[in-house]
Image: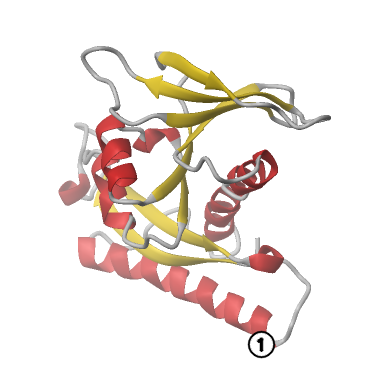
């Protein structure tokens, strides 16, 4: 995208980012519900609030959106979230919860997160789990009512968004843009999203067992 001056973020580089809200339904069906396209130089964190508007949902997102102040606002406004915590996060344990027998979870705690200068006001739930490769993950959420199994399954569903972007690049061939204007590039990306949604509709209507992702 070196010729796309409107999206330039370095002297010889230009780029855009696609922020996506992917709905994960039962029977492993996922579809894009909301999309925001920004230039590469714009900060990712500011897009989180654009994506969150439904209190009936559980939002699972990447570490790039981590912001303690937003965590507090989401909790105060009764929006529910689940995310992975950064390795260098400062954590203060408030309480240990009992683990179910035979659980693969290392710990389940109520915690405060952040330093004195940058600390969340609310308490959160921190789960330490092992992934399929044996790596330890720290998951942070404001849901204290869910079981460990439910939270683990919700985080696993986040993998669907990785598969989604792989699907866009491979079957739809969006590895490069054939136009230069901002409007035309957005059209190319939204057409890809529409094609995916049509694919999901066909899957539902035909009761196909073949996975979209």
The image shows residue 161 at horizontal and vertical percentages of 54, 52
Residue wearing tag 1? 205
Identified at 38% across, 21% down, the residue is 113
Q: Quadrant of the C terminus?
A: bottom right
Left or right: 80 as drawn, with respect to 163 = left
Q: Is residue 67 above or below residue 22?
A: above
Kindly indicate the quadrant of the structure image that contains residue 121.
top left
Is residue 181 visible in the rendered image? The answer is no
- Give coordinates of residue 122: x percent, y percent: 33, 31
> Seen from this angle, which residue lies furthest bottom?
205
Q: Residue at the location (60% across, 53% down)?
A: 160
Instruction: Give the image location of residue 59, x and y in percent.
Output: 45, 51
Q: How is the image coloured?
A: secondary structure
The part of the image, by quadrant, that contains residue 164 is: bottom right
Q: Is residue 186 above or below residue 62?
A: below
Q: Secondary structure at mark 1?
A: helix
Q: Is residue 9 visible?
A: yes
Q: Is 27 positioned to the left or the right of 111 in the image?
A: right
Give 31 or 139, whichever is nearer the viewer: 139
Which residue reaches farthest left?
6
Q: Residue furthest right?
A: 102
Q: Quadrant of residue 181?
A: bottom left
Q: Relative to 102, say whether 27 is above or below.
A: below
Q: Residue at point 33% right, 18% down?
A: 114
Which residue sits at x=34%, y=43%? 75
Residue 53 as seen in the image, left or right of residue 159 = left
Query: Residue 111 placed where, x, y %?
Result: 45, 22
Count all numbered tags in the image, as a single digit: 1
């Amino acid at each position: 995208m070196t010729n796309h001056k409107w999206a330039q973020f370095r002297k010889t580089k230009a780029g855009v980012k696609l922020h996506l809200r992917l709905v994960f339904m039962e029977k492993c069906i996922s579809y894009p519900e909301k999309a925001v396209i920004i230039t590469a130089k714009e900060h990712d964190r500011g897009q989180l609030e654009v994506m969150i508007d439904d209190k009936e949902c559980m939002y699972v997102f990447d570490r790039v959106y981590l912001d303690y102040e937003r965590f507090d606002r989401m909790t105060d406004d009764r929006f529910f979230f689940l995310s992975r915590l950064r390795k260098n996060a400062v954590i203060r344990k408030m309480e240990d919860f009992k683990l179910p027998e035979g659980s693969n979870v290392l710990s389940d705690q109520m915690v405060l997160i952040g330093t004195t200068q940058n600390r969340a006001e609310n308490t959160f739930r921190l789960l330490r789990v092992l992934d399929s490769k044996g790596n330890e993950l720290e998951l942070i959420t404001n849901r204290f009512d869910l079981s460990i199994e439910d939270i683990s399954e919700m985080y696993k569903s986040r993998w669907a968004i990785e598969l989604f972007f792989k699907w866009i690049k491979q079957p739809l061939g969006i590895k490069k843009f054939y136009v230069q204007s901002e409007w035309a590039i957005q059209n190319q990306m939204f057409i890809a999203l529409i094609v995916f949604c049509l694919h999901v509709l066909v899957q539902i209507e035909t009761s196909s067992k073949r996975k979209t992702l």
